[in-house]
Amino acid sequence: MDDWLKQCIKEVKAGDPEAFAQIVEAYKDKVYQIAYRMVGNAQEAQDVAQEAFIRAYTNIDRYDTNRKFSTWLFRIATNLSIDKLRKKKPDYSLDAEVSGTEGLDGYSQLAATDALPDEQVVTLEWQASIQEEINALPPKYRAAIILKYMEDLSLQEMSEILDLPVGTIKTHVHRGREALRKRLKKW
Amino acid sequence: MSCSSERIQRYFDGDLTRDERMQLYEHLRECGDCKSHYDEVKKSIALVQSASHITAPSKFTESVMDALPKRKRRSVAWKRWSRNHPMLVAASVFLVLMSSMVWVNWSGMSGDDVMVRGATGDVHVNYETNTVIIPEGETVAGDLTVRNGNVDVQGEVEGDLTVINGEQYMASAGNVAGNVEEINEILSWIWYETKSLFSGLTTGDDS
């Protein structure tokens, strides 16, 4: 583990919340990305990512410093995302069509300003369309694809984050990849 | 070599040996179905990876910090502050203890009883007028402290005379060799207590 991180965790454990700001700053994009890709929209992603950091802060004494910090943090974020999806499930089918466009939130807001260069608008559209395809995956395959291809994690780390055997992770990656392949064929 | 979607999966897992990879490439040149399957997986992965750079909203860190449990933060801020200012903490603890002690002494003696301390000579106390009288021709050898009463000095006091919560009168024949001090307010009382504490500390005299 990096020295600065070790130091920050030590300070947070000793009761200094300011040191935690450095940790948030360092991991916010990755945690937000996991949350965003999992839940599929910006508002809930922010809630989940924020909650993940708050839980990390309040449970910092339970973090084992011999293990990788990001693995522990991503595990919290992934579990919270899956919980969020599970709670949404009842109205999932009703929202299925809408859920894809939720990803457009950021785009719609930004487009309203009319101040963006074309290539940025295209990038946002692109992001939203891919998110739509990811939203169509069942949560467990979605988690596998996000962690492997977006966060670039090893199967071993994924196994620790998702609390599943490596063999199961592999199967989830295969199925997620196949589902995406079928959906993205037309692209 | 036959078609195998499982082998394509293993390829993308990075689980094929070099020889197996070579065999796969060879097969892909001959088999259109497998080639398109391979291309599609490759494209899906590339698309997903191309979308993977999003950043947290602005002010994200601030909003997390604001949302952290408050109780813990405050006690921590106090801990941190006190760690950086040990002298101030020691001083304020001293002040709190000191003032409560003074207050107890002050309020404890604000009853009606006249108290005389340090009188070695023949001192007369009139409880009706709350007056301590040092009769003419009488000499108090050391310091004299009177609480809750007036002092009428007709004789002589060789040391200091302190009157707390009262007044002192001096007859023309009376004489006080040391200082005369009247203490009627809590603030001057505190000053008196502090002075006597420190003089007690410096002289090592605890009486």
Image (spheres, rainbow, N blue to C red):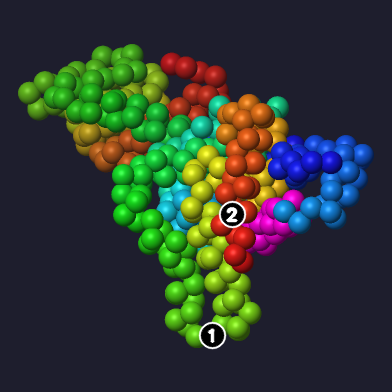
- Residue displayed at 43% across by 65% down: A101
The CA span between labels 1 and 2 is 36 Å
Name the side, left or right, on which B51 lies relative to B19.
left
Which residue lies under the disc numbered 1? Answer: A115
- The residue drawn where x is 56% and y is 61% is A130
Left or right relative to B26: residue B168? left
Task: Name the residue rendered at 56%, 71% in the picture.
Answer: A124
Asked if A152 appears above or below A58 in the picture, the reply is below
Q: Secondary structure at mark 1?
A: loop
Between B193 and A123, the one lying in front of the other is: A123
- Image quadrant in which you'd find residue B185: top left
Image quarter in which the C terminus of chain B is found: top left
Dot in front, 1 or 2:
2
Q: Where residue B160 sits in the image (x, y, percent)?
A: 39, 29
Q: Residues within 10 Å of mark 1 (few under 14, many from 20)?
A: few
Q: Main secondary structure of the magenta part?
A: helix
- Where does the image place residue A151, in percent across and percent down from the top left? 66, 49
Do the residues under discs 1 and 2 have CB atoms within 8 angstroms?
Answer: no
Image coords of residue A10 (percent x, y): 64, 34
Q: Is residue B53 visible?
A: no
Residue located beneath label 2 in the image = A182
List x then y, in percent, for residue A57: 52, 39
Q: Is residue B132 above or below residue B7?
A: above
> In this picture, which residue range is highlighted in magenta?
B34-51
